[in-house]
Image (cartoon, rainbow, N blue to C red):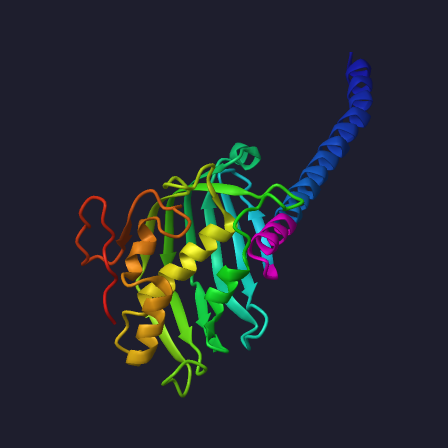
Amino acid sequence: MYVRILASETQMKPLRRTLLVLASLLVVAGVIAYFSLDAFLKRTVERQTSNSLKLSTTLNSARLSLFGGKVNLNRLRIASPQGFSAPHMLELGDIDLAVSYGELRNDPIHVQSLILDQPRLVIEQSNGALNFKKAMDRMPASDSRSAEKPIKLVIDELKIQDAQVVIHPSLPGVRQEITVSVPSMNLKNVGSGRGSQNGAAIKDVAMLVITALAGSAAESSSLPPEVKTILRLSVGKDPMKVLQGEVGGILGGKMTDLAPSTQPPSAGRASSPKKR
């Protein structure tokens, strides 16, 4: 009896080793596939953003959560239009998306929330034109001529936090850079407003964010009056109107200031940012 049991255990050892090897190979294959998806996502974001904005865009890294439902994009940088000195017009520290992985194959992609952490917008002037206005003028009215189908987004909630706007000395009355801290903002229903049709293109979302930051900076007490006037004229007499859907008609809801002391805005109106 003892001999039979020993022989059986001896026969099981090669099988166990085989199963362990197969399990190890599956883990390695899973890790390779995971990082391959991250690399593919990074390339896709860089290509789609560059094509949509007609401006060179780089991304440090892209990460899909192992547990699903979350995407992190780190250090997105959008170059300045030609003729401007700043290497990057807009930089973002982290972009966190809450989105079902199944949605990534849909058109438009439905995003539950998108958080922009530490965006930094540089505003400068060259030959009488502001950089972000120049960027808007370069963008085609339609993406129909694009060789690749553009990504469209519907975002339930878009948060902008710890933002800064840097005013370049090229603007009138500015002798050295002025950095304006912008209050946190919360935009609702991006991509579901009038005229948005099938979601918002990346260029529309980017310009909505840029215009919102510029409009908020225009209310800062640290800026010279002539700079305030230029910014207000660039984003409209009422800067907050851009947050009610006037940038491509992409904002279906409203904007609220996330500061604790802010009172909720009335229905259909966007609250103005606090003056700084």
Where does the image place residue 6, in percent across and percent down from the top left?
Answer: 79, 20
Q: Quadrant of the C terminus?
A: bottom left
Inspect this view and state whether residue 162 appears. no
- View extreme (bottom): residue: 175
Q: In the current view of this chain or complex, which residue is farthest to the top?
A: 1
Query: Viewed as shown, does residue 52 lie left or right of 225?
Result: right
Residue 253: give x, y in percent of width and height.
Answer: 31, 43
Depth order, front residue of 51/262: 51
Q: Is residue 36 above or below residue 125?
A: above
- Please tell me whether the stretch drawn in magenta is mainly helix, strand or loop: helix
- Quarter residue 274 falls in: bottom left
Q: Is residue 51 magenta?
A: yes
Q: Residue at x 38, y 83 (%)?
A: 172
19 left or right of 91 in image: right
Q: Who is closer to the viewer here, 3 or 205? A: 205
Is 201 inside the magenta-drawn segment?
Answer: no
Query: Residue at 47% of width from left, 36% of height from top?
Result: 198
Residue 110 image position (x, y, % from top left)? 46, 37
Number of numbered discs on residues = 0
Give the quadrant of the N terminus. top right
Image position, residue 41 (x, y; %): 61, 46
Using the image, determine if residue 192 lies above or below residue 216.
above
What residue do we see at 28% from left, 72% from top? 220
Residue 115 shown left or right of residue 86 in the figure: left
Magenta range: 42-58
User: Is residue 144 visible to the viewer in this orientation of the structure?
Assistant: yes
Residue situated in front as seen by the camera: 250 or 134? 134
- Residue drawn at the location 41% of the way across and 80% of the way down: 171
Residue sitting nearer the eye, 109 or 149 = 149
